[in-house]
Amino acid sequence: MTTRTATPAVPPPGAPPPGAPPPSLTIAAALRAAVAALRQPAGARSPGSDSPRLDAEILLAKVLQLPRSALIARAEMPLSNAVHAEFTDLIARRAGGTPVAYLTGEREFWSLPLAVTPDVLVPRPETELLVELALGLLPIAAPRRVLDLGTGSGAIALAIAIERPQAEITATDLSAAALTVAMQNARRFGASRLRWRLGSWFDALEAERFDLIVANPPYIAAGDPALPTLASEPLSALSPGPTGLEAFTSIVGRAAAYLAAEGRILLEHGDAQAAALGALFERQGFLDIRSHDDASGRPRAVSATRPRNPPQPEFTNQ
Ligand SMILES: C[S@@+](CC[C@H](N)C(=O)[O-])C[C@H]1O[C@@H](n2cnc3c(N)ncnc32)[C@H](O)[C@@H]1O
């Protein structure tokens, strides 16, 4: 009778020995996998991302607490399991439509790294046009009074405060949670001279007048097909109602009473709203109504000067 003894299996060259943990993914491989996960095929149910590589790099740099540029130099560095798990979770949330800014807690606006939370709109680069136009109306050394209606993260008010330290800026919002974020950002940048007011448009104010009113109010019509793709952001920051013009109507209808003589108002608007907004200003007797284009030539803001004989103020807080 012959006895057969089992020969231990010899692993092929290069394979990990039996029982060893699986080899770690490198930075390069993790980024490749993340880009594939974020680049959704047409018709996929989750929105994915239209900048998958950039998003993946920002999120991995955040998890590793490294600058984005370091990812290239360290492409072959293996990731620990904990880092890989955290990164995979962030990528899944991004693929589900959560903005990168909510995942990192930060968004740069006018070169300011602003803290953002889901209580505020993620500041958009196109809103920098409003800051540019506002700065053009504010002489450097003059203590002009500026009002930012619907300040959200504080983006516009803080950019102006940094560029025009002499300006007296009041910023309002209907959302107390948004104002908390804005005030946190002000502390971050040492901008201590701003006043913060809670309430609906001009109801947040006392009997006061401003040299400049700026606002990027909600302006997306309730039925707009783009709205569901922005579902992570507060609806109250995006859509004012069925037509998309409701906030403009409220603001333009009362702005004259809050503007100083020669005072100007500057409002951001959506594609195709320039004519409707211009008509609102005209109906209220505003002067020198101008439309302003962004860098790609699309009209994105309207400015106007207070009417000569403005209606009597209705200061509700008096
Ligand atoms: C489009 S977001 C703009 C946020 C910020 N100014 C920016 O440009 O990133 C509109 C802001 O208006 C605020 N808002 C909406 N309705 C308001 C109202 N009736 N009165 C005051 N603020 C309002 C929202 O809470 C939101 O912060």
Image (spheres, helix red, strand yellow):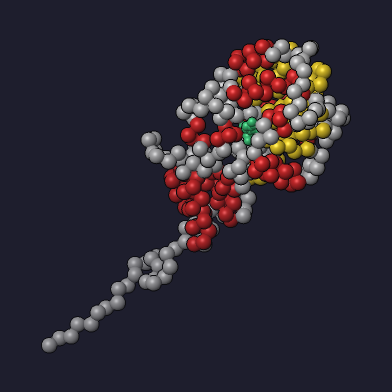
Q: Quadrant of residue 219?
A: top right
The residue lying at 46 percent from left, 40 percent from top is 48
Q: Nearer the viewer, residue 315 or 67?
A: 315
Q: Is residue 43 above or below residue 57?
A: above
- Nearer to the camera, 164 or 71: 164
Q: Residue at x 52, y 36 (%)?
A: 230
| Residue 76 x %, y % | 52, 56
Q: Tell me, yes or no, if residue 184 can be seen here.
A: yes
Snapshot quadrant of residue 21:
bottom left
Q: Quadrant of residue 294?
A: top right
Direction bottom: furthest residue? 1
For the point 49% across and 47% down, the residue is 93
Q: Position of residue 262 (x, y in %)?
A: 81, 17
Quadrant of the snapshot with the C terminus: top right
Q: Position of residue 102 (x, y in %)?
A: 58, 45
Q: Is 74 drawn above or below residue 232 in the view shown?
A: below
Visible in this render: residue 125?
no
For the N terminus, give its image quadrant: bottom left
Q: Is residue 85 above or below residue 9?
A: above
**Is residue 261 found left or right of 115 in the rendered image?**
right
- Estimate the x, y position of residue 116 in percent, counting from the top left: 63, 43
Q: Is residue 17 above or below residue 204?
A: below
Instruction: State which image quarter holds ligand 1.
Output: top right
Tally of marks:
0
Q: Nearer the viewer, residue 16 or 207?
A: 207
Residue sitting at 68 percent across and 20 percent down? 252
